Image: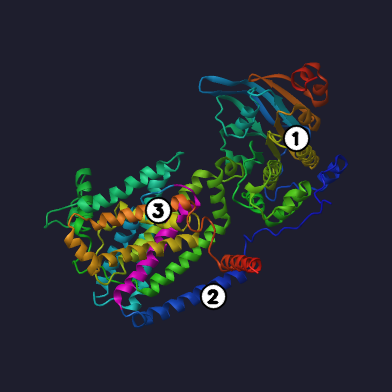
Amino acid sequence: MAEARTVEPSPSHEPWRARLRDLAVVAVVLVLAFVVDQTLDRVIPDSSVRQLLMLAACNVLVALSLNVINGMAGQFSIGHAGFVAIGAYASAITSSRLHERFGAGDPTFAHSFLVVPTSLLVSALCAGLAGLFVGLPSLRLKGDYLAIVTLGFAEIVRLTIGTAQISADETAGHAWSEVHGLGSFFHAISVSIAGLGGQNGYAGPHEKGVPAYAGPFWILGLTFILGVVAWRLKFSGWGRALRALREDEIAAAAVGVDPTRYKVTSFVISSVGAGIAGGLIAMMRDGNPTVQPESYNFQSSFDAITMVILGGSGSVTGAALGGVFVTFSVKLIELVQGTNAVQSLKRSAEWLDLNALRMIVYAAVLIALMVLRPEGLLGERELTLRTIRGWLRARQERRDRKAEDKP
Amino acid sequence: MSAPVEAKDVAALGATMRTKHPTRPDPSVAMGEPLLQVRDLRVAYGGIKALKGIDLEVRRGEVVALIGANGAGKTTTLKSIARLLPVASGTITFAGKNLATMTPEALVGAGVSLAPEGRAIFPNLTVLENLELGAYLHRDATAMRETIEDVTRLFPRLGERMKQEGGTLSGGEQQMLAIGRALMARPTMLLLDEPSLGIAPKLVQQIFAAIRAIAAAGVTILVVEQNTKVALSASHRGYVLRTGEIALSGNAKELLQNPEIQKAYLGG
């Protein structure tokens, strides 16, 4: 019998009650983040571990943002570090300038409520504009042009900042006041870029370091909230259209999805996320308060790709897991290298380049993953309570079956 | 459970289908008046002329079949109307609008939906998600729910597989999904590209019964088919293409009786 089954369409317009619930969740998260912020140095007295935790959270943001373009949109960007760098420099400059306005004492929690949002806004804006600038021409074309252009872009950002030099007596303010014509205009730009500190990195206007305004409250709170945003994005109508586009461009156009617009928008969103992550990384360091161009080399773009691929392209929870895993594994390898056994080995065999060894191990792990599980740990699936319960149930059933077989 | 749509049910099913677009005004073309007009359409692949000046017309409420042998230019014609191929010269007018300058995605907004060849559905999305994407441009909750109901009545098999991923469906079911997805946009006109391609004969009958029902609901249809007999039996009129030109055209019943066609395409 051809009976008409009523099917509930997925909720696209949510009632105000759901919005209220969202607000409540955000409020709870902020309170929790505040509690963690106030107690973290007692729970974890070791500051290097605290820093590692915060770095892991920032890397989760890097992975989540890259996942939008590489995982959800199915385009391949391999210059994510370029956008992280732009975000880092933008917020480093903004926060140190604001810090000076506040009298340049110790960064206070109250002031961070002005400094962090403003700096991150500037970061997001700069990185987003850069994303538009890179994405608009390269995403109109079919094929892997985005990969080529992003790779070039990240290297241009790093090398431009790293190699710009000026004589000691020139300042950006002076150079800009002297602009009359194209030549002096470009000179002023290069003086400004050189003001970022070149290879030595940017450490604030008076070389006192970038103030560490982004404490655990900001980093953990924002990571969680932006993680939820990424999750909602994936399952929204917008995210679904994006996945449709990745699966079949002609079919997507046949339902009215504009391919170029979606690709460019997702790339800009991805860049904005990278900018925010970079902005947080710049403002979180205790010990080494500079932003250096070498932190944003190809290796770090590649690390971001590893995070996304490891966890599973297109999976929000997968990207988050990948971010945590890569951060800790890099740290673990550093710790192993620092042990006495490895150090004495290094002394006895000087030809042994441990850093190169690290890359070999890394590559081997990736190759093994590509062979054994090409879709990543989670594939496109999400790690939720329900999926975990499903796995546990399946495991229990398997065990029960075995137990029945035995007697 | 999944009873095929019987011929006697078709008109009744069509009469209950809801096809009015939630926002777009109905085009000011009366039933039986020309809705789509193609004039002197020429398309070339590199130097090879695939279409050498096609003229065709689809009137509102009609089902028109475009038939012909492999390589005659049927799919090329449909793809240029659907804006998936660049047009060398000629005009394509739909309800007074010039389609030739539109992008494929803009066509949906104008009221023309395509069910692409080769069942281009989204394999990793569920059947329901595939359908919901069809309503991507209007996203009207009521219209979505209604059309999903209509589609499940047209294709009961889809109703049983709503939560399944599109890629796990059989070829015939994927074709049903492609048509259902196109209907979700509440089109004035439906373009069907080879709906019987690679599908079991029994399902072909079901799909064409559904096409009749959709036509009975008032949706104008242009269908490209290799299966001449099935296509012409479901259509009002037909055009026969041969090496990029229209060789014959006319009433579908007359074309079916035409000895030349019987000899060339129906194995008679």
The residue at the far front in this view is A407
The residue at the far right in this view is B8
Which of the 4 image quadrants contains residue A105?
A: bottom left
A230 within the magenta span = no
Query: From which residue to which does the magenta span run?
Result: A46-75
Disc 3 vs disc 2: which is toward the camera?
Answer: 3
Residue B51 at x, y = what percent? 61, 22
Mark 2 crowd level (few <14, some 14–19, many ≥20, 10 Å Cα): few
Is B233 drawn above or below residue A165 in the view shown? above
- Name the residue type under label 1: Arg
Q: Name the residue under label 1.
A: B60
| Scheme of colours in the image | rainbow
- Name the residue type under label 2: Ala
Is A33 drawn above or below residue A276 in the view shown? below
Considering the whole magenta stretch, tell me its main secondary structure: helix
CB under 8 Å between discs 2 and 1 = no
Q: Is residue A163 visible?
A: yes
- Name the residue type under label 3: Leu
Mark 1 crowd level (few <14, some 14–19, many ≥20, 10 Å Cα): many
Tell me what residue is drawn at x 40 percent, y 65 percent: A324
For this view, does B93 lie left or right of residue A381?
right
Q: Earlier in the sequence, mark 3 or mark 2?
A: 2
Q: Mark 3 points at which residue?
A: A366
Q: Name the residue under label 2.
A: A24
Q: Nearer the viewer, residue B125 or A340?
A: A340
Q: What element carries label 3?
A: helix
Residue A38 at x, y = what percent? 37, 81
Is A243 drawn above or below residue B88 in the view shown? below
Q: Which chain carries label 1?
A: B
